[in-house]
Amino acid sequence: MFHVNDTREGRKNEISGYIKEGNQCVAVLLATADFEWTIRRAIMALCPLPTSIVKEFILRNCSGPDSYGKVWNDLIANNKGLNFPKYSQDSLRLSKLIPHWVFFKKAYDLRHKIIHGVQGTTGLSFANNQVQYILDATDIIIDFCTLNGVDLYKNLRYVKKLKSCNNCMVFKTSRLNNKL
């Protein structure tokens, strides 16, 4: 479906192509997979914790908007050691950064219903709207990273040692303290 050397526009075109072909359920699943790929890379790129800790303990079982929102808020929005001068502290929260958060969560819920067999199909127009909410959320994360010097479509730096993590909620857990 997606490839290592994809571009943002290429992915969006591929996802939109499934809508045009009448494969709206595939489009919903791919849009959410693209969002998860994007948000995970963004968290790893912006987070001051070592990459291995983020992957192994924080993102390992992370899935869905609420879970990603909590991790984002703990590691990115609430970390006063990071500097995002174009944003207020409150506007860094994932639910504030993505302006149509409620609609995005409902769109993401459609993925859950499709993947778990609760809903077998969906209307073309409805799916198109839901996919657009997901793609818009993904674009916002990409734009945020770009504004802060991170290109998610290039190799990310691998953090080996802890950088500034003032008020980093996840860092304060004993499980992570034992690993660092």
Image (cartoon, rainbow, N blue to C red):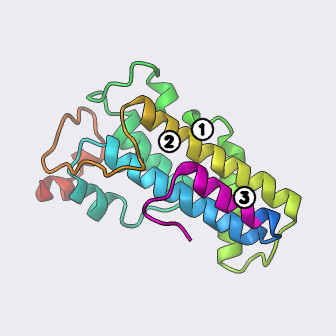
The CA span between labels 2 and 1 is 11 Å
In this rendering, the label closer to the viewer, 2 or 3 = 3
Residue 24 location in percent, x, y?
Answer: 77, 67
* x 57%, y 33%: residue: 96
Residue carrying label 2: 142
The residue beneath circle 1 is 98
For marks 2 and 3, give the CA distance: 18 Å
Specify whether 94 is left or right of 173.
right
Residue in view at x 58 percent, y 42 percent: 139
Q: Which mark is residue 16?
A: 3
Residue 80 vertical position relative to residue 27 in the rendered view, above or below: above
Label 3: element kind? helix
Q: Is residue 180 left or right of residue 167?
A: left
Give residue 47's position: percent from left, percent from top: 30, 43
Mark 1 vs mark 3, CA separation in Å: 21 Å
Quadrant of residue 78 in the image? top left
**Residue type indicated by callout 2:** Ile
Q: Main secondary structure of the magenta part?
A: helix
Residue sitting at 60 percent across and 60 percent down?
32
